[in-house]
Image (cartoon, grey):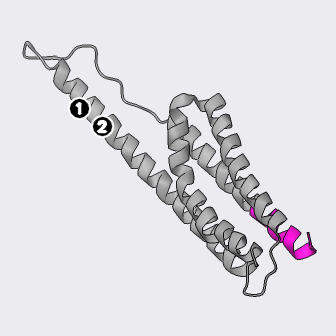
Amino acid sequence: MKKTSAARFIVFVVIHVLLCVSAALYVSEYTTLIRLESPDSMYIDGADFTPLAELAVISVNGFLSAFVTVICFAFMTILSVVLLIPFRLISVRKFTIITRREQRATLAVILAGTVLTALAVLIFCGVTSVPRLLLFLLPSLLIEILMYWLTLYFRSKR
């Protein structure tokens, strides 16, 4: 690889690692989210209100879970856009020469980073956190594949 290709590849690897670590940290924070506990029994004027209280607790926990998921997804989307779109516009210009080796290495970094992040989340946060990680990585992966890797792919075919 030439100096410019190597620099472009290294910057992409750093950005991809940053996005993967951010998604993993959001997932780990989500798993430590404080959840409300339902009361053992709740009697008001001799009537049992325990099912109603449990329903309220489940509703609040579900609402907070959905709210935090939407906020984390939005933050990952914003972070991906801020990092990847200017990188794509600056690094790959009209007359940039892309080799097949760089294009394949970029795809390998995308896949390896995603798999390694999923394995780390699986080990540290549990099986139930992996789908949420993939949800948080979705904007990053879409932008990386559709805007950056496809450009490298079509430019390397020339």
Q: Residue at the spot x=75%, y=64% of the render?
A: 12
Find disc 2 in the rendering and name its residue: 60
Name the residue at the front extreme: 158
Counting from the top left corner in percent of width and height, residue 150 is at 65, 69
Nearer to the camera, 75 or 107: 107
* Residue 57 located within the stretch drawn in magenta: no
Closer-to-camera residue (34/149): 149
Looking at the image, do the residues carrying marks 1 and 2 touch, with CB atoms under 8 Å apart? Answer: yes
Between the residue at mark 1 and the residue at mark 2, the CA separation in whole angstroms equals 6 Å
Q: Residue at x 32, y 42 (%)?
A: 63
Query: Image point 39% across, 41% down: which residue?
Result: 65
Q: Total number of numbered labels?
A: 2
Which element type, helix, strand or loop, lies under badge 2?
A: helix
Residue 148, quarter of the rendered image: bottom right
The residue that mark 1 highlights is 56
Q: Is residue 57 left or right of residue 85?
A: left
Q: Is residue 128 left or right of residue 24?
A: left
Residue 6: x and y in percent read 88, 68
Of the residues shown, which amino acid type is indicated by label 1?
Ala
Q: Which residues are magenta?
A: 1-12
Q: Secondary structure at mark 1?
A: helix
Q: Residue 151, position in %: x, y?
A: 67, 73
Extreme residue toward the right, this view: 2
Q: Is residue 44 above or below residue 18?
A: above
Local crowd size for mark 2, using a 10 Å CA cut-off: few (<14), some (14–19), many (≥20)? some
Amino acid bearing label 2 = Val
